Amino acid sequence: MAPRTAPADPTVDAASAPLAGVAELTSALACAAHAPAVLVTIDPELEDGALAYGTACDSVARVGLGADLLPDQARLRGVLAHEIAHHALAHGQGAVRIWQRGTYLALGALLAAVVIGAPDWVPVAAAAIAAVLHLITAWCRRREEYAADIYSVRLLEAAGLDGHAIVTTTLDTVAQESRWYRLAGWIGGSHPTPDARRRNIAYSRWAPHP
């Protein structure tokens, strides 16, 4: 008599279906971005957020997705494409890293000036330089966000999807910042407001250069 097999568990199939969709979409987007490989992990601690990152051990592009994104396939597509776009455009490198290191050096100089009791103008100058470098770094990071939005549209369209509609819909779900941030706080922030990102999508003011 042939051995009996356990019946398929429909709950397992239902749970694995979104993950299969993520794997397929990741492969299509990575191919469109000419990326050799993209490793996606599901991190419950990210909730409905996402993160593009790498490690010092290898050159594999990594994307962390919040578990709360899985039920919302439309938003998941936009977020995943955005993070892969960051990798494809080598964001976080080059100018951003240089300006950020300059900020840390200026803060170090400020701390050293306070510890050794340097003349008052020295810590004041170091603080001013650190503030300026921070603003420049923030501006560069906002440009990267604009570029990733536009490039994610291209990646989604290369994968056979309506990139413009997906990215616009994804931005519509981003929580609106406080009134203070919308008025002036964004100047020192690394992320533009959703309204500013939507305007950039419409006019392509900061187009990426892969």
Image (tube, rainbow, N blue to C red):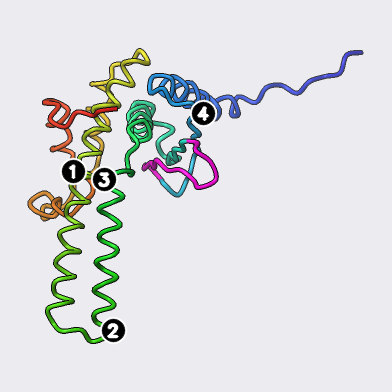
The residue stretch that appears in magenta: 47-60
Badge 3 element? helix
Which of marks 4 and 3 precedes in the sequence?
Answer: 4
Residue 57 in the image, given as x and y percentages of width and height = 55, 45
The answer for how far apart the CA atoms under marks 1 and 4 are is 30 Å
* Res. 192 mark: 1
- The residue that disc 3 covers is 95
Which residue is the site of mark 4?
A: 19
> Is 162 positioned to the left or the right of 34 in the image?
left
Disc 2 marks a residue whose amino acid type is Val
Labels 1 and 2: the sequence-earlier one: 2
| Label 3 to label 4: alpha-carbon separation | 35 Å
Q: Nearer the viewer, residue 200 or 141?
A: 141
Q: Is residue 167 above or below residue 49?
A: above
Considering the numbered disc 2 on the image, is that residue within a helix, a strand or a loop?
helix
Q: Main secondary structure of the magenta part?
A: loop
| Residue hosting label 2 | 115
Q: CA distance from mark 3 to mark 2?
A: 30 Å
Please provide percent x and percent y for residue 209. Answer: 25, 28
